[in-house]
Image (tube, helix red, strand yellow):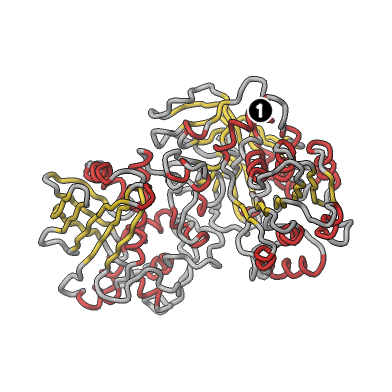
Amino acid sequence: MRALYWNGVNDLRVGTVKDPEIVNPHDAILRVTLSTTCGSDLHFIDGYIPTMKPGDVIGHEFMGVVEEVGPEVRKVKKGDRVVVPSFIVCGQCWYCQHNLYSLCDNTHPKPELQAPLLGGYPTAGIYGYTHAFGGYAGAHAQYVRVPFADNDCFHVPEGVADETALFLSDAAPTGYMGADFCDIQPGDTVAVWGCGGVGLMAQQSARLMGAERVIAIDRFPERLQLAREHAGSETIDYTQVHSVPEALKEMTGGRGPDSCIDAVGMEAHGTGPQYAYDRVKQALRLETDRGQALREAIMACRKGGTLSVLGVYGLIDKFPMGVIMNKGMTVRSAQQHGQAYMQRLLEHAQKGELNPAYLATHRFSLEDGPRGYDMFKHKQDGCVRAVFAP
Amino acid sequence: MAGSIMAVQRNGSSRRGRPSSDASAGGRMQGLGWIPIALGTAAIVAGLGSRKKGTMALALTAFAGVTAAAAVRDGQLGRGKADSKGQGGASGGEPEVERSITIGKTADELRHCWLDPRTLPQIMAGFATVRASGDGRMHWKIEGPLDRAYEWDAETVDDQPGEGIGWRSLPGAGVPNEGSVRFRPATGGRGTVATLHFRFDPPGGALGAAAVKLLGTTPLDLAADQALHRFKSLVETGEIPTTERQPAVRADTR
């Protein structure tokens, strides 16, 4: 089959590989209908997250049709149209049983590779996202092996389009979880840094959960427009204001937003001396991450408010821990626990309350995958997500 | 099951006094250099890279154990720091390790699974070939680099329902050793803590004290951790997570 693979830093290629096969009894093989780029992919494409090997097939956000099932699979069969969350979960361990799916104990084949990054407690495996995160072959391909198919394949109801279901694999559950972390009360104001796929989903979710105001921060006009149009967000272009925290304070009667969601992560752009500091240190590999958005979120939040971190990070410098402590903030963060939210998301999608299909701004064949990632990475032509049809 | 030449990498240089270089077998992994690898196995592999003659070198390379060999085979590890701070290793004496894991099942269920003849071969597969040879006996085989293999028979010496199982190599084993897995309840109703213990006695003869000094325990830590993780997955889900035989655009896809 054809597949998009990592060949080195900023070097993606399309090649021919063997088809995946059933290896474990709970496996299924999926024929991929659609897969999409995700902002977090950029971190290993750029080389900031290590442990990729040349030849690794990438892609962790996808949906498709079941092609084959292993002997222990009971809930899905050949021909079923399903969406699959990016994290692979067993459903049996303590973490799965407590809805903390991305922390599953039983889906990382080589936990020793993750130990240096995370201190010895391995997380769940994820498709197409470095050997430290399980080394599973990704879904930018014609076929993908889905372990624990009974847990991880969710039937897409009739009436929900492929392009809607696709983003329920990652962008939607991540954003939804980020809003869920804020424990939104009626009348709340939620600020969201980032108007990419995850940020837009967080904004829409916050509104669904009862936020009275959602304020979105970004710099790309077309993305800010999507935030206004699809989430009803008020928007801040951070290149046009002196200080985002000051702007937010004014917009909230001097209080600050009740919750702040970071949907930006380690490759944040910014302005000013802090950003320059981060860029230099990152270039010298003295610091891996740029924390502009995260720091702003901490500074902007009201006293006693919640910081909800969805952005992917490694190590960060100059972290305002004292602000968190003195303002008595709650910090919640996780990789997406998609399996916990999928039923709700499918219901919202069926009712038309949350339809992420508009994120698919650009479509490519798999053969044009590298170009798709390039356009996605550089946000050319208003690209929010590049979607591949193998 | 071998310890390793971890003392080599703790001293910050390979056996031959050269700095470690990339493991090249099976393709190199990008960008591990700035993260201290818990094992420094790459340093062992680098130390094994050349064909050094002599009893000591051959014995040491054999002792490096399948963990390192498996890492080479898998091509999973690239650049690593030669001077990792000896994580998890004993500072001297016999190589020995004890590791624990919490499993959401009862001690009886764990014991039952452990004693199933299909279990040990699966959970030890990362570093040894194990098979039941009847009457509570097991046959172990570890393949080191350079096609050296260590084999021995072990017998169950201790089987306390609800408490655990112990075993010991039979006389004549090239590498006398003993091991046990013990079970005790986890707090908070979270199931059972399984504790795996391995201990390897120094062989006599030509290897003797020098080999003892050089046998660290970091790879034993890895072997024990791996075995426990696999055991937990097997008991809780009925399978062991794997990426075997999956597609990748390289020649060494397993």
Give the image location of residue A283, x and y in percent.
Answer: 69, 67
Q: Residue, x 37% and y 68% (percent of image)?
A: B88
Residue A15, by quadrant, is top right
Is A352 displayed left or right of A95 in the figure?
right
In this rendered view, identify the residue nearer to me: B38 or A105. A105
Is A67 displayed left or right of B237 in the figure?
right
In this rendered view, identify the residue nearer to me: B91 or B175. B91
Q: Quadrant of the C terminus of chain A?
A: top right
Is A275 displayed left or right of A161 in the figure?
right
Total marks shown come to: 1
Query: In the image as oriented, which residue stretches furthest toward the top?
Result: A158
Q: Residue, x 17% and y 64% (percent of image)?
A: B176
In this rendered view, identify the residue nearer to me: A195 or A23. A195
Query: How many other residues sit within 10 Å of disc 1, few (<14), some (14-19) or many (≥20)?
Result: some
Q: Residue, x 56% and y 35% (percent of image)?
A: A84
Tell me the element at label 1. Answer: helix
Is A81 displayed left or right of B142 in the figure?
right
- Above or below, A103 against A31 in this view is below
The answer to whether residue A322 shows anywhere in this view is: yes
Pointer 1 chain: A
- Above or below, A97 against B38 in this view is above
Give the image location of residue A377, x and y in percent.
Answer: 73, 49
Q: Return the residue at label 1.
A: A162
Give the image location of residue A19, x and y in percent.
Answer: 50, 35
- Above or below, A120 against A60 in this view is below
In this rendered view, identify the residue nearer to me: B50 or B106. B106
Residue A70, by quadrant, is top left
Q: Residue, x 78% and y 41% (percent of image)?
A: A212
The answer to whether residue B249 shows anywhere in this view is: no
Residue A373, by quadrant, is top right
Give the image location of residue A335, x and y in percent.
Answer: 58, 48
Q: Amino acid at mark 1?
A: Asp
